[in-house]
Amino acid sequence: MFKALLFVGLGGGIGSCFRYLTSVVTHKYILSAFPWATFLVNVIGCLLIGVLIGFFTKQQVENSELKLLFVTGFCGGFTTFSAFALENIKLFQSGNTFIALLYIALSVILGIFAVWSGMLLVK
């Protein structure tokens, strides 16, 4: 268990640093009200998790340490949106369309509501 946490923590730390760097670079070169940094991180993270899962599946990589380092750790530290997207793809692929749509709707609506509620709580 400790070894797994080490791989996730290492990957997550590196992913978080890359997320921060993406934000710094984006804010330096793009002046816009649109949240480009978060948008780019989410899209890049989704592409990356797709490439990693596809590669691991195609190559039949069973090394859970690599998956913990790159998928759970790096992608999770870079953006949790990639995990959210992957979970929904798996739900759609397994025929759980209603659950996927419910998960998407509830996550977005309740997530926004939770942020708003949290802000109200500390006012």
Image: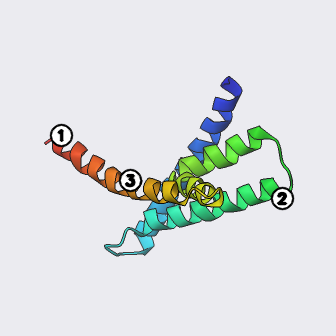
Of mark 1 and mark 3, the one earlier in the sequence is 3
- What amino acid is at disc 2? Lys
Circles 1, 3 touching at the beta carbon (< 8 Å): no
- What amino acid is at disc 3? Leu
Which image quarter: residue 10?
Answer: top right
Residue 58 bears which disc, if any? 2
Please tell me whether mark 1 or mark 3 is closer to you in this view.
3
Q: Which residue is mark 3?
A: 106
Q: CA distance from mark 2 to mark 3?
A: 33 Å
Q: Residue furthest top?
A: 2
Q: x, y percentage for residue 12?
A: 58, 43
Question: Which element carries disc 1, helix, strand or loop?
Answer: helix
Circles 2, 3 touching at the beta carbon (< 8 Å): no
Of mark 1 and mark 2, the one earlier in the sequence is 2
- Does residue 41 appear to the left or right of 114 in the view shown? right
Of mark 2 and mark 3, the one earlier in the sequence is 2
Q: Residue furthest right?
A: 59
Residue closest to the eye, 67 or 40: 67
Q: Residue at x 46, y 67 (%)?
A: 39
Q: Residue at x 75, y 38 (%)?
A: 65
Residue 121 bears which disc, if any? 1
- Does residue 71 appear to the left or right of 109 in the view shown? right
Circle 3 residues within 10 Å: few <14, some 14–19, many ≥20 = few
- Does residue 22 appear to the left or right of 113 in the view shown? right
Q: CA distance from mark 1 to mark 2?
A: 48 Å
